[in-house]
Amino acid sequence: MSYLHDKPLDETEFPPFAAIKSLFGFVPNFFQCQTMRTDIVEAEIQLTAAILVTDGALTRRQKENVFLVCSAANLSTYCVTAHCEIVRMLGLKGPEPEKVALDHLNTDLPMRDKALLNFALKLNGQPTKLTRRDIESLRVYEFTEQQILETVVTVGFAKFANWVAFGLGTLPDFEAIKLPHLAS
């Protein structure tokens, strides 16, 4: 499950996992491999709810798409695999999540959403090159200040989750998606 050898807790030993399991039918390895610090897991669950799950200025699908493109750019097999399955479990409409993750420009996403994902990728990969002009380009597509803020926070959260998964050696919960950059 991960590089750490601590025995993970399950939903009978850690009540927050019962809620996750009832929602998704499983408890992600991402959380299970961190149960030696349940306080951190609880904080991450709250962040997930606040950033990804709770309705905000962006739709859940837009937030998942931002998470997917950033995770794919960061080569996070764990997060891409998990969030593709989550998109399917939630029945979110739109192009196949794998296509969004790997090549959002060649999907039938609206141009507005492609612009949002381009912005997210630039922030994710070249944060020091982001300028006011990048923000203004989102305003051309009528993104509000709150939508831009949610995008920035979602990019940061994706990066955080990707790095935690890498550092812990978290194994995917489902059959891993082959990211082309990792193919050998």
Image (cartoon, rainbow, N blue to C red):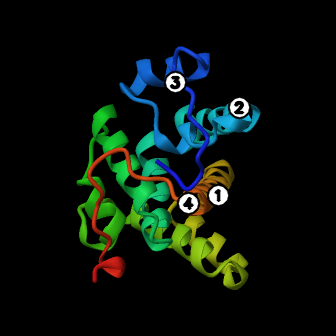
User: Are there few (<14), some (14-19), or many (20+) residues within 10 Å of tag 3?
Assistant: some
Residue 81 visible in the snapshot: yes
Do the residues under discs 4 and 3 have CB atoms within 8 angstroms? Answer: no
Q: Which residue is mark 1?
A: 160
- SS at mark 3 in the image: loop
Tell me the residue that label 2 is attached to: 38
Q: Which residue is mark 4?
A: 162
Q: Which mark is drawn over residue 138?
A: none
Disc 1 marks a residue whose amino acid type is Phe
Identify the element where label 1 is drawn.
helix
The residue at the point 53 percent across, 34 percent down is 53
Relative horizontal placement of residue 66, taking residue 155 as reference (left or right):
left
Question: Distance from label 4 to label 3 (Cα)?
Answer: 22 Å
Q: Amino acid at mark 3?
A: Asp
- Distance from the alpha carbon under mark 1 to that under mark 3: 23 Å
Rendered location of residue 38, percent (x, y): 71, 31
